[in-house]
């Protein structure tokens, strides 16, 4: 009887591991990114240097819509991100000068490719209402998780750069 029990136990020890599911040896991607869209608002309040009035402030908000687009031909580890941005800000000078509002109101849509651990810097230039001598430069940080602002600056523009040249 003891021999039967020993043989039964040994046979169970030999055959049970063989019936278990095989161990997965292939790499498993645990970095599934959410494909659902989301939107948000970035409050903007930062100092700028204006060539005309010196130090000024940029105040307002940027509304955004961020969506990871699934694509059947997309390379594994790369994500196509659709971004809609709407800038609604105003430049306020610190000198208290009386002038028409220096506002920036513009929207844009972009599609960028982002890897799963990476970021993309998206640079946008916005015209400033009532100012032909400057443009607002904004660098956006685009990831698979959302949108942020990295840097804002004012760049001078030659207002006569689009003038037609007449040759003799």
Image (cartoon, rainbow, N blue to C red):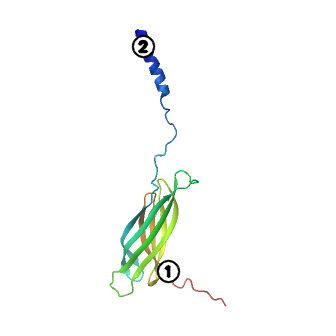
Residue 115: x and y in percent read: 50, 55
Residue located farthest toward the right when viewing the structure as drawn: 168
- Residue that badge 1 annotates: 157
Residue 90: x and y in percent read: 38, 78
Disc 2 secondary structure class: helix
Q: Label 2: how many residues lie within 10 Å, few (<14), some (14-19) or many (20+)? A: few
Q: Alpha-carbon distance for marks 2 and 1? A: 91 Å
| Nearest to viewer (mark 2 / mark 1) | 2
Residue 117: x and y in percent read: 46, 53
- Residue that badge 2 annotates: 6
Viewer-closest of 67 and 119: 67
Residue 88: x and y in percent read: 41, 75
- Quarter of the figure that contains the N terminus: top left
Disc 1 secondary structure class: loop
Residue 146 picture quarter: bottom left
Viewer-closest of 148 and 93: 148
Vertical comparison of 120 with 61: above or below: above
Which residue is at 47% across, 29% downward? 20
Mark found first going from the N terminus, 2 or 1: 2
Which residue is at 47% across, 60% downward? 67
| Residue 51 left/right relative to 70 | left
Q: Label 1: how many residues lie within 10 Å, few (<14), some (14-19) or many (20+)? A: few
| Pointer 2 with pointer 1, Cβ within 8 A | no
Which residue is at 49% across, 71% downward? 108
Residue located farthest toward the bottom when viewing the structure as drawn: 168
Viewer-closest of 7 and 130: 7
């Amino acid at each position: 009887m003891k021999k039967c029990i020993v043989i039964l136990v040994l046979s169970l020890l030999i055959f049970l591991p063989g019936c278990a599911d095989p161990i997965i040896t292939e790499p498993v991607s645990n970095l599934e990114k959410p494909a659902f869209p989301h939107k948000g608002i970035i409050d903007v309040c930062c100092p700028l240097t204006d060539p005309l009035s010196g130090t000024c402030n940029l105040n307002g908000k940027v509304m955004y819509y961020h969506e990871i687009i699934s694509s059947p031909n997309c390379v594994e580890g790369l994500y196509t991100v659709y971004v809609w941005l709407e800038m609604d800000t105003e430049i306020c000078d610190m000198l208290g000068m009386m002038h028409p509002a220096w506002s920036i109101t513009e929207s844009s849509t972009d599609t960028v490719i982002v890897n799963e651990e990476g970021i993309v810097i998206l640079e946008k230039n916005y015209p400033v209402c009532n100012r032909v001598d400057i443009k607002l430069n904004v660098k956006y940080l685009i990831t698979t998780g959302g949108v942020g602002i990295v840097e804002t600056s004012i760049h001078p523009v030659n207002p006569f750069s689009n003038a037609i040249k007449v040759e003799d």
